[in-house]
Image (cartoon, rainbow, N blue to C red):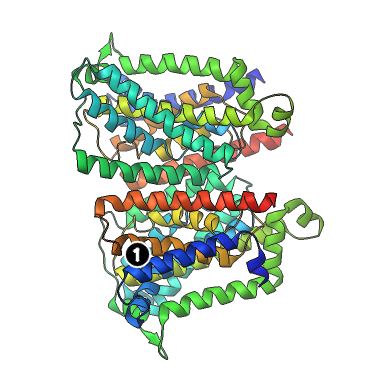
Amino acid sequence: MRALRYTGILPSLLMLVVVIALNARLQPHFFGLPSLEDNIATLTPTILVCLAQAVIVLSGELDLSVGAGVSLINCLLATVPISAVGGPWGLMGLALLLALALGAINGVIVTIFGLPSLIATFATAAVWFGLALALIPQPGGELDQSVGDLYSGTVSGVPVPLFIVAGALLIWTLLGRHRLGRRIVAVGSNPAAAFQAGISVLRVKLAAYLVGWLLVGLAAIAISAQTLSGDARVGDTYTLTSVAAVVIGGISLAGGRGTPWGALVGAIVLGIVSNVIYFAGIPSIWQEFFKGIVIMSALGFMVLEQKRAAVA
Amino acid sequence: MTALRLGRPLLLLALTLLLLAAGEVLLPGFIGPGQIANQLKIASFLGLFGLCQTVVMAAGGQGLDLSVGAIATLGGILGAALMNGSNAMTPIGAGVAIGAGLAAGCVNGVGIAVLGVPPLVTTLALSSVIDGGLIVGVSLAHPANGASPGLVAMTGRSFHGIPTVAVLWAVIAAIAIWLLSRSAWGRRLCRTGANPITARLSGTDTTRVRIVAYMMSGGIAAFGGFLLTGYVGQAFLGLGNAYVLTSIVVAAIGGVALAGGRAPYGGVACAAILMTVLVSLLTAINIGESGRQVIFGLTLLSFLMLDRYLMRARH
């Protein structure tokens, strides 16, 4: 309940209720099991990338290379033959290793070299995109069906994507109770004070990048399992979505304020909006425009609500 | 201080000469007069978009304009629709394009300076609205998209071997350098970026300065898109996309800090020339889009590290 009292999350919860109500009204059998499973499978990568951005933002940094990172991991998965790594699990392990490596590079550049994360990760995004393009110049390549089967399967009746999201949230919850989670927030809200209190700011930020990129790796696996092919631009939209979800979820881009639940709500709002636009029968040429308008109004709404809350 | 201010442009020019020499060695004819004129043309566009970032980054508060690409496309498409291929209507097309850019920049400025939404988010959201709106507009109205012969000539022609568009850029650059480093407004801009609180206390209307900075960025981006329409021959969706990344790269390499307070446009202009030569060299030796992206990213990172090193050395 303490999370709810945080001023930032109430307006975003309101938005969540509105978009779910709209979606339920427009999409036939929205609450039916097949459609729910389908929606969750599509939403999972978005949720994971938004959670990743949230942990990095909470530590007081930012990562504009998550989208390009998703693409690079996707392209690697579509290039490596599954026999070379011993089955789908080997392939996934490889994806997570690459994700951790990319996160470590970003983390080191931002912490040890001390470059501003906004522009440094903008630069690494270009590098990731270039590498992805080198692996898969044209969308194509092929992933083994076994990866897709794993993702669309169920574990004792529960769909795998739901398991992944639940797992990610569990990690988050544990993080909140564990020292590292509190340290991330402390470093994000006031690095100097955290340093005075004996916290290694560098190490905590680096850890935030690694945790975040582990989630990015999971997201890339989920996307690849759905498309079963490689595309150097598949992750492009995730960068904007993740930053917007973080803001809509009431997490301050200045760091140290907000909760992962906010990012979850923001991710679902943005994910379901595409659903609503699709099922409302809006002609395809209007979809981009409406999505932009919704993101903009959601941002404006959040900011005004926060200002009002700050005054009250 | 003067040494430092001149140091960056000189370093960038030296690197440019080095690249030109390397190009000539690898591919004889790389530095022919026609080649140089062509590169100056391309650099002019990059330089204009770099100016957008210079102004908003100098205004501080993590200033950044990721909507320059969308606004450029908007300017190009609006301008082409209005001039409808006629020379007489070209100035009107340019005027409306710039007006639309100023309006878009004003939306950015109000969102950032009044509502307090981070620049990154504001400009990204606005660019998705503009891009989406353009898709609707173009598919419903099917506007004319060709540039008038006059505009094509102006952006493509050379006068005694010097491209007209480069002359235009030089004039704009001279005005920009004066405005940013000599004028009272430029000093207010840098003061706002360096420390908004002291700037406000000493009587600067920082909100207005920031809004004007984003309006300038929008106006210049739209004008850049309009000129680009002439250079390419027609306006199309995605016309300005490539300039989002590259404009930030040249601003950062040119010595503008994301922290704000510095607007060395001379350095940015030299960086625009350097990056243009780099791209053309890479293209000439058959390095594709993927290699160019990687080298772009690494170049930006190295200059960020150089800045960091210089900053530490000074303290």
- Helix or strand or loop: what does disc 1 sit on? helix
Type of amino acid at the residue the image marks with label 1: Asn
Identified at 30% across, 57% down, the residue is A136
Total count of labels: 1
Where's residue B162, x and y in %? 32, 13
Q: Quadrant of residue B191 in the image?
A: top right
Identity of the residue furthest to the top in this view: B160
Out of A312 and B49, give the one closest to the viewer: A312
Q: Quadrant of residue A222 in the image?
A: bottom left
Left/right of residue A176 with respect to residue A43 in the rendered view:
right
Left/right of residue B44 with respect to residue A169 in the rendered view:
left
Q: Is residue A40 visible?
A: yes
Quarter holding the N terminus of chain A is bottom right
Identified at 53% across, 32% down, the residue is B56
Out of A286 and A118, give the one closest to the viewer: A286
Identified at 36% across, 61% down, the residue is A274
Where's residue B284, x and y in %? 29, 35
Q: Judge whether B191 appears above or below A193 on screen.
A: above
Where's residue B16, x and y in %? 43, 26
Q: Judge whether A244 appears above or below B188 on screen.
A: below
Where's residue B137, x and y in %? 26, 40
Out of B79 and A282, give the one closest to the viewer: A282
Q: Is residue B256 visible?
A: no
Q: Judge whether A92 appears above or below B225 on screen.
A: below
Q: Which residue is mark 1?
A: A275
Identified at 66% across, 63% down, the residue is A6
Chain containing the residue with disc 1 = A
The crowd level at tag 1 (other Cα within 10 Å; few <14, some 14-19, many 20+) is: some
